[in-house]
Image (cartoon, coloured by chain):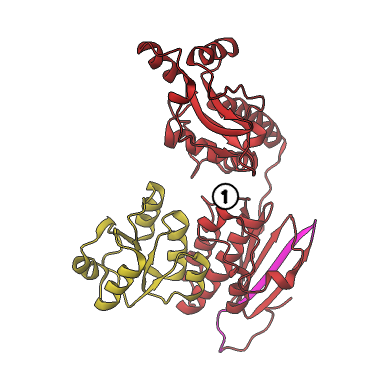
Chain colours: A yellow, B red
């Protein structure tokens, strides 16, 4: 499923859309960046509350195509800039990681 | 309050090194003029006038309770409430800095919050200083002077390029989260240009990123070196200390010495070094407290082909 198809169904707030044409095959939920590095499957959507520039670095390196920020956490501008440059879409929701993971899992 | 027009992302590396090397405690004013909660706004106005300052932290012992700025004094004067206690008029949610943070944090805060001053706390949350844009500008000018003198004396050296393999090096600074991941992103880009399996590139990126983050989080500073051979990628992460007390502990999954601040950023889960070892084909770590740590990781880029000359 493409990032944009997933996004359309979930109707979450879109912060960066540069990676919308990428393919999502899997998902991973974690706030520990080392855990994401070590265990997240490639072509995943990452569901997390870690909203800063390093999250994008980890996503780029681990082959994550989309970021979903939970609990409506603020996303700093430098993070969104980096996401644009790296071509990774960023979405945001009021829901927590549990609910968001459940919804994403239903659709994948 | 205007921010400081200094870009902490892509300023020249000399400037970046400066603002990461200098700590807030090196730059702040230590002798802070404070007042207590029961002081009247009038008394605070007197302190401001006598000391020629524009902000006074309100304290109880060494604990910071709030801050009164010149604007606060002016508005109480305007309302005819200048004889009232400072506790009624101070700003309570004060944005503070920690003394061990790099100066870059203070510059970012000046831009972000548009305050003229930030109280500085130590690890025990005690007020130890105050930092203003004036402090920053003064120190930066002094440092720039020193640095320019040094640079003028340097003769540029040309680098030898090895045609067979490629070598890349990056400097990593303590607590420089802004640029953490830069080395790993660069190496990943360089590898993508070569005929290497995507999964193997990812393993190299994982090893590199974890080692890079370790330098930023735990070391006093150091560097990453990459040697790309036709057969393997050799990563060396070397730092200037403080060194690891017990290497076996450091290699245990879940063991971490990271503080709460670092953990709140999603690091310090105690998975870094075990992750590196897991994705590497060869892995060595040497550490001496007081001297520093060197980690070497080798990953074969074409595991099915016969190999020679990957280890040293």
- The location of residue A108, given as percent across then percent down, is 27, 78
| Left or right for A88, reference B184 | left
| Left or right for B163, reference A103 | right
- Residue A63, located in which quarter of the rendered image? bottom left
- Residue B127, located in which quarter of the rendered image? top right
Question: Which residue is depicted at the point 57% across and 27% down?
Answer: B137
- The location of residue B133, given as percent across then percent down, is 53, 27
- Residue B239, located in which quarter of the rendered image? bottom right
Question: Which residue is depicted at the point 63% across and 81% down?
Answer: B281
Say which quadrant the C terminus of chain B sits in. Answer: bottom right
Say which quadrant the N terminus of chain B sits in. Answer: top left
Q: Is residue B24 visible?
A: yes
Q: Nearer the viewer, residue B92 or B288?
A: B92
Q: Is residue B17 above or below residue B129?
A: below
Chain of the residue that carries numbered disc 1 in the rendered image: B
Q: Is residue B193 visible?
A: no
Q: Secondary structure at mark 1?
A: loop
Q: Which residues are magenta?
A: B289-304
Residue B80 covered by magenta stretch: no
- The location of residue B236, given as percent across then percent down, is 67, 66
Tally of marks: 1
- The location of residue B201, given as percent across then percent down, is 50, 74
Give the residue at mark 1. Answer: B176
Residue B291 covered by magenta stretch: yes
Q: Is residue B200 above or below residue A14?
A: below
Question: Which residue is depicted at the point 55% across and 17% down?
Answer: B53
Q: Residues within 10 Å of mark 1 (few under 14, many from 20)?
A: many
Q: Nearer the viewer, residue B79 or A4?
A: B79
Question: Which residue is depicted at the point 60% across and 42% down?
Answer: B102
């Amino acid at each position: 499923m493409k990032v944009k198809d997933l996004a359309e169904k979930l109707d979450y707030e879109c912060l960066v859309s540069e990676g919308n044409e990428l393919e999502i095959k899997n998902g991973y939920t974690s706030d520990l960046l080392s855990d994401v590095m070590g265990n997240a499957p490639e072509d995943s959507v990452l569901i997390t509350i870690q909203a800063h520039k390093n999250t994008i670095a980890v996503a780029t390196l681990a082959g994550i195509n989309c970021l979903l920020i939970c609990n409506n956490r603020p996303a700093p501008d430098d993070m969104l800039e980096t996401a644009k440059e790296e071509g990774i879409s960023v979405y945001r929701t009021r829901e927590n990681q549990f609910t968001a993971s459940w919804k994403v899992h239903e659709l994948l | 309050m205007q921010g400081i027009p200094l870009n902490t992302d892509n300023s020249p590396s000399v400037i970046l090194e400066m603002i990461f090397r200098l700590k807030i405690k090196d730059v702040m004013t230590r002798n802070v003029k404070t007042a207590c909660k029961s002081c009247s706004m009038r008394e605070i106005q007197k302190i401001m006038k006598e000391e020629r300052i524009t902000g006074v932290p309100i304290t109880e012992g060494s604990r910071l309770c709030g801050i009164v700025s010149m604007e606060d004094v002016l508005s109480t004067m305007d309302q005819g409430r200048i004889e009232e206690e400072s506790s009624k008029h101070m700003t309570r949610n004060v944005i503070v800095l920690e003394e061990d943070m790099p100066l870059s944090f203070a510059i970012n805060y000046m831009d972000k919050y548009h305050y003229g001053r930030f109280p500085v706390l130590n690890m025990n949350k005690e007020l130890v200083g105050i930092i203003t844009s004036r402090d920053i500008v003064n120190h930066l000018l002094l440092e720039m002077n020193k640095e320019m003198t040094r640079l003028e004396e340097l003769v540029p050296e040309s680098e030898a390029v090895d045609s067979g393999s490629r070598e890349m090096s990056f400097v990593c600074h303590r607590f420089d989260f802004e640029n953490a991941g830069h080395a790993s992103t660069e190496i990943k880009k360089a590898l993508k240009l070569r005929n290497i399996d995507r999964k193997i590139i990812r393993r190299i990126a994982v090893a590199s990123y974890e080692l890079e983050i370790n330098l930023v989080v735990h070391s006093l500073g150091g560097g990453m070196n990459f040697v790309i051979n036709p057969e393997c990628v050799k990563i060396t992460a070397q730092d200037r200390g403080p060194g690891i007390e017990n290497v076996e502990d450091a290699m245990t999954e879940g063991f971490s010495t990271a503080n709460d601040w670092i953990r709140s950023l999603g690091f310090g889960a105690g998975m870094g070094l075990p992750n590196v070892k897991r994705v590497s084909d060869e892995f060595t770590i040497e550490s001496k407290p007081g001297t520093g740590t060197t980690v070497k990781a080798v990953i074969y880029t074409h595991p099915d082909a016969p190999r020679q000359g990957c280890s040293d």
